[in-house]
Image (tube, rainbow, N blue to C red):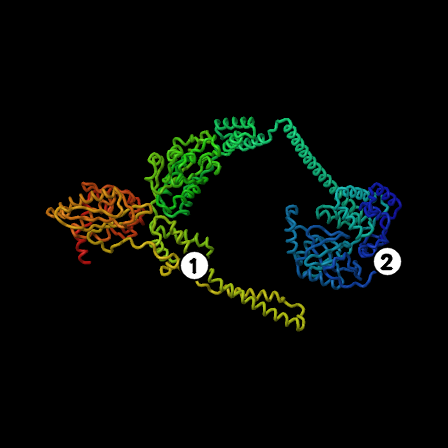
Amino acid sequence: MLKVLSASCLHGRLQCVSSRLPIHSSHGGEGRSPLLRLLRSMKSPISGSPYYRRRVFFCSESGGNDGSCETVEAKAENAETVEEVDPKSSSAIVPTNPRPEDYLSVIALPLPHRPLFPGFYMPIYVKDPKLLAALIENRKRSIPYAGAFLVKDEPGSDASLTSGSETEKSTYDLKGKELFNRLHEVGTLAQITSIQGDQVVLIGHRRLRITEMVSEDPLTVKVDHLKEKPYDKDDDVIKATSFEVIATLRDVLKTSSLWRDHVQTYTQHIGDFNYPRLADFGAAISGANKLHCQQVLEELDVYKRLKLTLELVKKEMEISKIQESIAKAIEEKISGEQRRYLLNEQLKAIKKELGLETDDKTALSAKFRERLEPKKDKCPAHVLQVIEEELTKLQLLEASSSEFNVTRNYLDWLTALPWGNYSDENFDVHRAQKILDEDHYGLSDVKERILEFIAVGKLRGIAQGKIICLSGPPGVGKTSIGRSIARALNRKFYRFSVGGLADVAEIKGHRRTYVGAMPGKMVQCLKNVGTANPLVLIDEIDKLGRGHAGDPASALLELLDPEQNANFLDHYLDVPIDLSKVLFVCTANVVEMIPNPLLDRMEIIAIAGYITDEKMHIARDFLEKTTREACGIKPEQVEVTYAALLALVESYCREAGVRNLQKHIEKIYRKIALQLVRRDSPRELSIEATLRRVDSSESLETSSQESSEALTEGATCSDSERTEEKEENIIKEVVEKPVEKVVVDVSNLSDFVGKPVFHAERIYEHTPVGVVMGLAWTAMGGSTLYIETTVVEQGEGKGALNLTGQLGDVMKESAQIAHTVARAIFLEKEPGNQFFANTKLHLHVPAGATPKDGPSAGCTMITSLLSLAMKKPVKRDIAMTGEVTLTGRILPIGGVKEKTIAARRSEVKTIIFPSANKRDFDELAPNVKEGLEVHFVDDYSQIFGITFSDNQEDENKEQ
């Protein structure tokens, strides 16, 4: 039996210390303090303890000349032959026949974080498979011991800045001689108590010192077993130091229950305490640095070891005091807040009893003031005055009154607006150009105007608000380009439509006296975006309504006037709002429908539409890609040819915009998706059927194997792994089979989108006598139309003109003018011919169901009448447009770009425009003007010379 401190004076001092410890009488002796049991274990050996008899080999550590070796011999008679222990066993000690000191060559285990002290458990993870296999093999051979050595820090590295995971990773990477050089010389002989997976649980026995390396993989070293230096058990200094360690441990045990568990576990496993073990215990359970713990492990002088341990536990005591003070401060803070909360609740109850309840009103006032505080410096003085007045009124109103809710809502809107809060604008012209080009193809006029706006803002350092109106047919990107402009300028975006709007209150707001009153759209916009300089898109401004509630177009005059909107007055707020920094972008299909006073305040940018080339770019680069991704189709699964897209544009989507083109492309890809799903379904069924056959065959093989001899030991893979491998190979084989790509071409385009909607606009390959092609503008873009004239009857004085084709009043008047001018010109060319005087003519403009109006068909009608009178067809592939006066002068027309696009679509080679429209034509893109012969005329005589030239007559005869 170990004899720890046998001197009577020591027993007396221990008795004195233990008498001061608290003893818990509940549950008999079970509830005593762990430190009290520690002290009593130092007073009287526990030779009768069953733990001691079970763990006799723990006591084999050299304890100087304290007779520990005799103890091992005395108890060895109870040990039986060691049997092989299951690696998953959790037993603490594995009895072995050789004594621990007999092991002079051990496997070295690196410890990354802390050294292992004798008598303590430590789980470690062994990542090296060879090392783990060697440990398992040694344990099977009843050699359950290894050397545990702390790893030194890397040279030049700061241990305080290195994380635990990084330390473990670097430790696992070390092997052989490199690991040997990084190990501390002094370590611990550790018994392997269990191995579960790669986790090895160790318990320390005695100190070791490495002498030399035996082998590298796994690292095996020769060791010397160390013993403490002889010491005098009756030395007063050693006694005093040990008592101070015990006293400090007692104080620390009061603050931490975890330490008490350490004491219980240690006394159960190590047996009696002595001075060396007391030092080891104190160092092991402290949270000291690993190098300080290693110093305690390496120290063989008992007195010096106790001093080192005393320093560590003193530091631990100081940390415990700091922890206690922090906990106390937090507790005081929490109790103070609880006390304040209780007092506030009592105050509310008292106010309620006295009829001074202002909870809701006070909270609302605080909420409004808090919301206004960040904007107080930027908020106009007149607005602050109104807010203060309303807050004062709110405190005086009863919460149940209707006026209270009106005032509360009014304050809510006033404090929610972004007074003086502007977003940082981006004046980078190149970035804006890039964004606009990314989002839209073409539209150079719009992009150039926005870049001009940005350039002016950069030079001035501040951007003023503007009112821009984008006009054009549907689907050309008017609304979407507004969003792109906002992104290019780094402004917030807000859109609202005024199509069909008939109530002025939607723009200017309701009076607050009305039930359910709300501010107008602009105030709602500012609240939603949170900035005072957003980009506001007012959609469909040409479709404003007018009803009994006023004229919204007139209400927009103040909103869209740069001189007035700096003090825009909303009926609900009733305070001026600065909208001068807002950029307004309006959209319209027909500019003529916008009232003139409102139109005068806007800068018109016309978007004529897209020609075929532009539509092809948009479809290929944007619409097709976006639709394919939206349908979940991969690029390698489908191919839409260029010819198919061209046919789609020309035969199905001839309108100026691309909205209908997008619908048709979506329709194509939806049908392709359905084809792909239907085609993949048989493949999935094939995979499932094959897998079922594999499962059935595997089950038959498994049953036959069970009836035969057992599988040999060490088989490389299990039945389930082989089955999974077969299934993966089958799926891979089926999936990797080449899949036929879906190709959309002109030949099968009708299978996806049906029959063509548009046919060739050219009714005649060669226009006959009396037929001339004209150019017209519509809300859907430009188009070509034919003017047809024929003879009804001839006779003396029967000259007349009948008109058909749903012509409007202006066009009917233009036809009468054309008849007069043609008659005059024909008489000039053939003075004796009375064709117009004696012939009843019929002029028709197909298609009959389409309403038509406008003066620009005047020159076309004259040419048609002259062609019939002269019995001479006009020049081939020619189209014209222009208003004619009674004297034959040609006046300018509108829609030059749309009409040019329509002419190109109908393969017209020659176009006649009024001279006044030359500037409009010159502004067109080069790809629009390419391949066209354009004549600009001032008088109809010039048209006559171009249309009825002599070489044209020769050409017609050849045909």
The amino acid marked with disc number 2 is Ala
Residue 914 visible to an observer of this rendering: no
Sequence-wise, the earlier of marks 2 and 1 is 2
Q: Dots 2 and 1: beta carbons under 8 Å?
A: no
Image position of 180 with respect to 554: above or below: below
**What distance separates the C-alpha of mark 2 from that of mark 1?**
88 Å
Task: Provide residue 127's location: percent of width, then percent of height.
Answer: 66, 57
Q: Residues within 10 Å of mark 2 (few under 14, many from 20)?
A: few
Residue annotated with mark 2 = 74
Disc tally is 2
- Quadrant holding the C terminus: bottom left
Residue annotated with mark 1 = 638
Depth check: give the residue in front, 744 or 858.
858
Task: Provide residue 651's location: percent of width, then percent of height.
Answer: 33, 55
The amino acid marked with disc number 1 is Val
Q: Residue at x 46, y 40 (%)?
A: 492
Q: Quadrant of residue 942?
A: top left
Depth check: give the residue in front, 19 or 526.
526
